Image (cartoon, grey):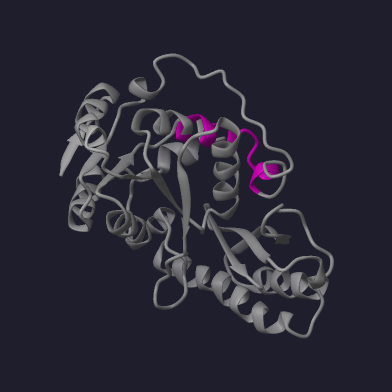
Amino acid sequence: MKVVHTIKELQSELSTHKDLYKKIGFVPTMGALHEGHASLMRKSVEDNEVTVASVFVNPTQFNDKNDLLKYPRTLEADCALLQACGVDYVFAPEIAEMYPSEDMRMFSYPPLDEVMEGKHRPGHFNGVCQIVSKLFDAVMPDRAYFGEKDFQQLAIIKKMVDDLKYPIEVIGCPIVRETDGLALSSRNARLSAEERENALNISQALYKSCTFATNHSVEDTQKMVENAITAASGLQLEYFEIVDGNSLQKIANWDETDYAVGCITVFCGDVRLIDNIRYK
């Protein structure tokens, strides 16, 4: 495995493989890697002849400067995990490499980016599209892999790829959870032992809602989850919405779609956690 820090070096390395028509898989990350990321890496290694992973904490997608400052940075440990997964190249650029000047591009994909995270984190998805497009331009992979935990992000990236006509297959991979149900997240490292225990209420409420939903309305299911989180110690609900998995718009009745997903964001202490679950 080779670690490179500049676009020029990365493209030089990859050009040999592209000349031989080797399939290239790409997994963009912000580091602080865990088993969820590892599952993406292994999928790429399985599907492609060459796998590239990027490790870059992207400043333009943080609308909270404190969140950016607190985001864990663990490149040495990340590289050890990536090597164990069989990754061929790690692209770990500095900010100046990715943003030699301010990126003034504006990405807008309504209604996908106007709800949920888009509503609560203004500018977030514009920053995501800025960096992912830059990384796609640098790597030009055949396939790119993203976790379904960031459900709305995955939908928007697919839309961006279609809009910009990238010849890239975007592949969503299932959420990876701890044995107790907690969705794996780089932010989990910031949870105290007590906060982590409190955070279990998020996945527990979602799992219970799946059974509840079989004989209750969308509205009652939403209230059930909201009440469960509100009653739990140390948690503050930002939103829970049951949406069509394609349009990301709220549904009022289960028969409106054959792809219903519950998306939730909760503050556990000062750590913002997201999760989702599919109802059908």
Q: Is residue 194 visible?
A: yes
Q: In the rendered image, which quarter contains the N terminus? A: top left
Residue 269 in the image: state x and y as whole percent.
53, 57
Q: Is residue 39 above or below residue 160?
A: below
Asked whether residue 87 is drawn in magenta, I would say no
- Secondary structure, magenta segment, majority class: helix
The span picked out in magenta is 117-132
Identity of the residue drawn at 46% across and 53% down: 171
Position of residue 163 in the picture relative to residue 170 (left or right): right
Q: Nearer the viewer, residue 172 or 225?
A: 172
Residue 124 visible to an observer of this rendering: no
In the rendered image, residue 143, in percent from the top left (x then y), is placed at 40, 46
Residue placed most toward the observer, 165 or 10:
165
Q: Return the residue found at the far front.
A: 20
Residue 13: x percent and y percent? Answer: 20, 31
Q: Is residue 255 left or right of residue 192?
A: right
Whether residue 176 is situated above or below residue 217 in the rendered picture? above
* Number of disc labels: 0
241 w.r.t. 213: above or below: above
- Quadrant of res 202: bottom right
Q: Is residue 196 left or right of residue 11?
A: right
Q: Residue 192's image quarter?
A: bottom left
Was residue 128 drawn as part of the magenta stretch in this picture? yes
Q: Where in the figure is residue 188, as x and y percent of width and height?
A: 42, 59
Residue at point 51% right, 58% down?
148
Give above or below for 144 relative to 278.
Answer: above
Quadrant for the C terminus, please.
bottom right
Residue lying farthest left?
Answer: 1
